[in-house]
Every structure is written in C-alpha cells, then in structure tokens.
Image (cartoon, rainbow, N blue to C red):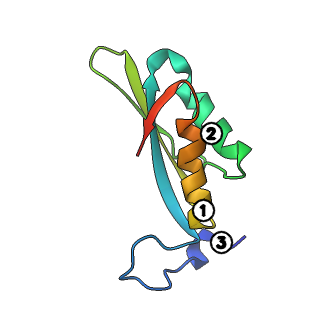
Amino acid sequence: MKDLDDIRAQNPDQGFQFPGLFEITAMGNATGDLERRVPSLLAGIGLAVMEGSMRTRSTQRGNYVSVTVSFTCPTREKYDEAHVVLRADAEIYSTL
C-alpha cells in the first residue's frame, strides 16, 4: 500500500480521488456501542481506521451518538461498500 504522503490526486479539479483518505460518520442509538462497531465493521471489509481519528458526538439528551472515523480507501467501490455495510447494521441509522 502507498504511504499517505505519496498519495496525490490524479486530477485535483475532480471530486473524490482514489486511493485517498476519507472520513465517514455513522449515527445511531447511544446504547449501540458504535465506538466499537464502526471500526469493526470497516475492518470486516478490509478497511483500517486510522489510529486516533475517531471523534464522537452525542445529542443534547444523550439518546443518539455520531461516530466519525478516517480511513484510507483504495477504490470508489470500497468507499460505497463502507456505507452499505454500516447502514446494514441494526444499530446504525444513517451514514455521511
């Protein structure tokens, strides 16, 4: 795999560039253990969450939480698969 410093956009004026560094946010029930689930689900499809990249945020009442992580993604198909696998989990309501 390429070193992150060696990844350059093929066309800087065009949307997503692969391989690349991306963020994904999953939102769900605060009791759903998303801090563990999100990295685990991504690992299950061969994507590794970058160490130290996780950010969490709870709603004002604490019923829901969002978990954002960064990961290196080799292809658009893998990026789309990340959203599909997270949305398929019963504890995750949506992704961004």
Q: Residue at x 35, y 82 (%)?
A: 13
Nearer the N terminus, badge 3 or badge 2? Answer: 3
What amino acid is at disc 2? Pro
Q: On the picture, is 96 further left or further right than 42?
A: left
Report which residue position mark 1 lands on: 77
x, y percent for residue 23: 47, 52
Q: Nearer the viewer, mark 2 or mark 1?
A: 1
Q: On the picture, is 29 further left or further right than 59?
A: right
Nearer the N terminus, badge 1 or badge 3? Answer: 3
Look at the image and tell me whether residue 11 can be seen: yes
**Callout 1 secondary element:** helix
The N terminus: image quadrant: bottom right
**Could you tell me how far apart the alpha carbons at marks 2 and 1 are, in whole angstroms?**
18 Å
Image quadrant where residue 2 sits: bottom right
What amino acid is at disc 1? Glu
Report which residue position mark 3 lands on: 3
